[in-house]
Image (cartoon, helix red, strand yellow):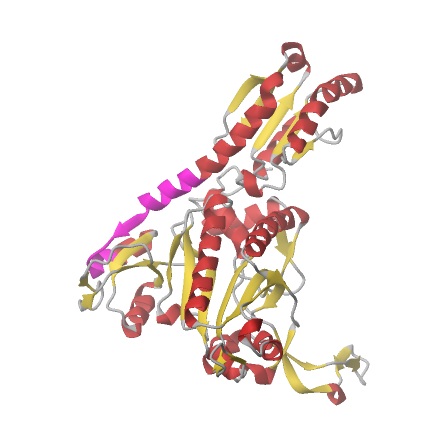
């Protein structure tokens, strides 16, 4: 599987693209900039979806679904929002095709032009808030805690599978509240959920913080985010949670009668993560031998490969191993017993290694004689021979070890690649090498833009858990209240 597979240090971009395709995660579609998510890749997304959906529902949220098409006029109601998304919008102008009178193919029927053009949703704030005005009349209708799982379209010119595509899958939560404090609490609650998911399920350490005004979501008062560091030294925004204030409520006239019997605008939040998390998962853990998946999100956690020459041997091995497979499945572990006779064991070993299966078990005639089984870990590529009798408990322990090891390894990588920088020359030199840079910033959008123009680095986040320490801006030399996180990013 890994033959002619590029090394990360030689061409990280090619390594990533080849890995996505050769590991059967996704492929480019006939539509430019769009992808086909293959079953193995979609199985990872389904696991992510299942975990997050439960976390949302455990905190009182419910799912709904809103239209794919948004009237163009909706976008003009919130000025910052339309400005932020205008260049990425795909627009539907007609509803019918007809045969070309010249006989050369199909053309748009100009008699079937829409009275109002429709935007294919890049995000759903506008259509949802137009709906909420019919749902909310009193404080008794609040809070409204709704999430939807959907696809969105943002017309991208430069695309990369999972990381940036014209169409992608995501969840987007949209909540309405009676008070400002409740909306802010909701925003922070979801940020904590995202960070918890990233660290405990994805085994990927993240920094929680707030975005600078230049990087803020279009239409938000504040945008909070989790940022992760990939193995090539670039940052990846892994999730965002926005405090929208009353901006959309005012734009769509969403008012309610409060407890004081007065009309007021509701307060809002929105938040989302997307299939780019699969890209993050790949880049956080995978290596030159292929994909590496944390056990909690692996579609196949354990692959069992019988080694045999004759059908009778396979039957004997199956009789021995089937109770083990069943016992593991009863513990909630996803197991694949690969008894295909179309591929040799060595090929199967390579396949499961390349596709990131956390544990591989192999058993042959000699193992049967010794009542043993070979166990291979994907994270360390270590192998050991253990007794079959205790294999179930051993597998459970190893899966936990692998999950924890991947997190510890990623955390160590981030610490080793986080640098405190105090002058402009050092900043320019370090940003070319990659990593997170902690540097002072004077708080102005002008300085932030100049830094971006000169280095392509952006402020990824203003950390929430950092102690404030005054200093001088790394670029302007003006006073600064605290350090922020700079990096080049996906």
Instruction: Classify 234 as above or below 172.
Output: above
Res 387 visible:
yes
Q: Quick check: 103 left or right of 243?
A: right
Residue at 55%, 52% (x, y): give it. Answer: 55
**In front: 380, or 247?**
247
Front-most of residues 256 and 379:
256
Q: Position of residue 153 (x, y in %)?
A: 59, 68
Total label count?
Answer: 0
Based on the displayed image, in which of its 4 quarters is residue 460 positioned? bottom left
The answer to whether residue 379 of the structure is visible from this angle is no
Q: Quadrant of residue 318?
A: top right
Image location (x, y in percent) of residue 389: 62, 17
Residue 95 magenta-highlighted: no
- Based on the picture, tell me whether residue 412 belongs to the magenta stretch: yes
How far across and how far down the image is residue 466, in percent?
Answer: 29, 55
Q: Is residue 54 above or below residue 219?
A: above
Residue at (60, 67) in percent of width and height:
152
Q: Which residues are magenta?
A: 407-427
Check the image and name the residue furthest to the top. 369
289 with respect to 229 (left or right) = right
Left or right of 66 on screen, residue 88: left
Q: Quadrant of the N terminus?
A: top right
Q: At which x and y percent is residue 394?
A: 55, 24
Give the main secondary structure, helix, strand or loop, of the magenta stretch: helix
Q: Which quarter of the rendered picture does the C terminus lie within?
A: bottom left
């Amino acid at each position: 599987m890994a033959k002619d597979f590029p090394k990360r240090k030689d061409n990280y971009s090619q390594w990533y693209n080849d890995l996505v395709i050769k590991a059967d995660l996704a492929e480019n579609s006939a539509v430019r900039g769009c992808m086909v998510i293959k079953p193995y890749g979609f199985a990872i997304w389904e696991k992510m979806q299942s975990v997050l959906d439960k976390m949302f529902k455990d905190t009182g949220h419910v799912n709904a679904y809103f239209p794919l098409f948004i009237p163009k006029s909706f976008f003009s109601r919130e000025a910052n929002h339309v400005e932020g998304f205008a260049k990425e919008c795909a627009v539907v102008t007609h509803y019918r095709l007809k045969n070309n009178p010249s006989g050369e193919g199909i053309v748009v029927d100009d008699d079937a032009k829409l009275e109002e053009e429709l935007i294919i949703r890049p995000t759903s704030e506008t259509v949802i808030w137009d709906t909420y005005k019919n749902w909310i009349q009193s404080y008794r209708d609040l809070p409204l805690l709704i999430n939807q799982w959907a696809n969105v379209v943002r017309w991208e010119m430069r695309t990369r599978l999972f990381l940036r595509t014209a169409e992608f899958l995501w969840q987007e939560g949209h909540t309405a509240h009676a008070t400002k404090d409740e909306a802010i609490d909701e925003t922070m609650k979801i940020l904590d959920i995202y960070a918890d998911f990233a660290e405990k399920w994805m085994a990927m350490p993240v920094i929680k913080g707030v975005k600078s005004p230049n990087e803020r979501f279009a239409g938000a008062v504040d945008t909070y985010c989790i940022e992760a560091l990939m193995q090539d030294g670039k940052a990846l925004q892994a999730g965002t949670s926005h405090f929208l204030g009353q901006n959309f409520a005012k734009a769509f006239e969403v008012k309610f009668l409060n407890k004081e019997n007065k009309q007021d605008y509701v307060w809002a939040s929105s938040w989302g993560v997307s299939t780019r998390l699969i890209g993050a998962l790949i880049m956080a853990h995978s290596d030159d031998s292929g994909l590496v998946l944390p056990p909690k999100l692996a579609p196949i956690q354990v692959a069992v490969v019988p080694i045999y020459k004759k059908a009778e041997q396979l039957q004997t091995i199956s009789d021995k191993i089937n109770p083990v497979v069943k016992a593991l499945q009863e513990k909630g572990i996803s197991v694949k017993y690969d008894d295909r006779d179309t591929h040799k064991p060595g090929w199967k070993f390579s396949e499961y290694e390349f596709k990131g299966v956390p544990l591989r078990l192999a058993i042959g005639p000699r193992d049967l004689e010794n009542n043993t089984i070979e166990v291979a870990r994907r994270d360390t590529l270590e192998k050991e021979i253990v007794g079959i009798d205790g294999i179930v408990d051993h597998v459970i322990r190893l899966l936990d070890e692998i999950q924890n090891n991947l997190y510890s390894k990623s955390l160590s990588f981030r610490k080793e690649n986080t640098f405190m920088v105090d002058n402009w020359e050092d900043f320019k030199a370090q940003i070319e090498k990659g990593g997170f840079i902690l540097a002072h910033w004077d708080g102005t959008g002008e300085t932030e833009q100049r830094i971006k123009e000169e280095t392509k680095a952006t402020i990824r986040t203003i950390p929430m858990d950092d102690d404030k320490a005054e200093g001088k801006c790394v670029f302007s030399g003006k006073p600064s209240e605290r350090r922020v996180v700079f990096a080049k990013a996906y």
